[in-house]
Image: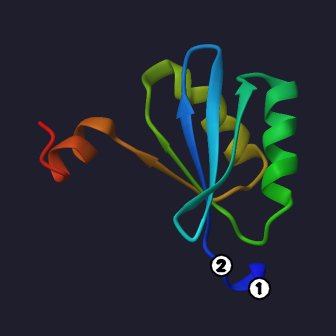
Amino acid sequence: MMLDMEIIFGIDVSKHSSNVAILIDGRTFKEFKITNNRPGYKILDDALNSFRSPKVIFESSGIYSRSIRSFLQRENWNYTEINPLAAKKRHGWV
């Protein structure tokens, strides 16, 4: 049943667009691309609203991640913003 599953939206933020992967219990359910503007964030908001308590995770990418952070805050979505260098160090990639 979907209510007991862990839903994660992993977002890879770029300059003009973002790639979104929806994971359900660690398995890719759906992937799509949005523009980093109001129409793109409406698509993301609709997707987030189709699940109960989804988690949102994205890497901090300087100025590029500011608008998605603002959107998530404005719409009261809980999110985790990961520092990419810290994540790489934690996993031994640096």
Q: Count neighbours of disc 1 (C-alpha within 10 A) and say few if under 14, some if 14 to 19, many if 20 or more.
A: few
Q: Is residue 31 left or right of residue 83?
A: right
Please give the name of the residue rendered at 66% of the width and 36% of the height, measured from the top-left corner.
Answer: 70
What's the amino acid at mark 1?
A: Met
Q: Which residue is mark 1?
A: 1
Q: Which residue is mark 2?
A: 5
Q: Secondary structure at mark 2?
A: loop
Q: Quadrant of residue 28?
A: bottom right
Q: Position of residue 8 (x, y in %)?
A: 60, 60
Between marks 2 and 1, how big is the CA–CA gap?
Answer: 7 Å
Please give the name of the residue rendered at 82% of the width and 50% of the height, measured from the top-left corner.
Answer: 47
Q: Count neighbours of disc 2 (C-alpha within 10 A) and say few if under 14, some if 14 to 19, many if 20 or more.
A: some
Q: Is residue 30 left or right of residue 79?
A: right
Q: Position of residue 61 (x, y in %)?
A: 44, 27
Label 2–label 1 contact, CB within 8 A:
yes
Residue 93 vertical position relative to residue 63 in the rendered view, above or below: below
Picture disc at residue 19: none
Q: Position of residue 19 (x, y in %)?
A: 62, 32
Q: Secondary structure at mark 1?
A: loop
Residue 36 vertical position relative to residue 46 in the rendered view, above or below: above
Q: Position of residue 23 (x, y in %)?
A: 60, 58
Residue 28 vertical position relative to residue 6 in the rendered view, above or below: above
* Quarter of the image with the C terminus in it: top left
Q: Is residue 28 left or right of residue 77?
A: left
* Quarter of the image with the N terminus in it: bottom right
Please give the name of the residue rendered at 64% of the width and 40% of the height, measured from the top-left corner.
Answer: 20
Foreground of the two, 11 or 70 = 11
What's the amino acid at mark 2?
A: Met
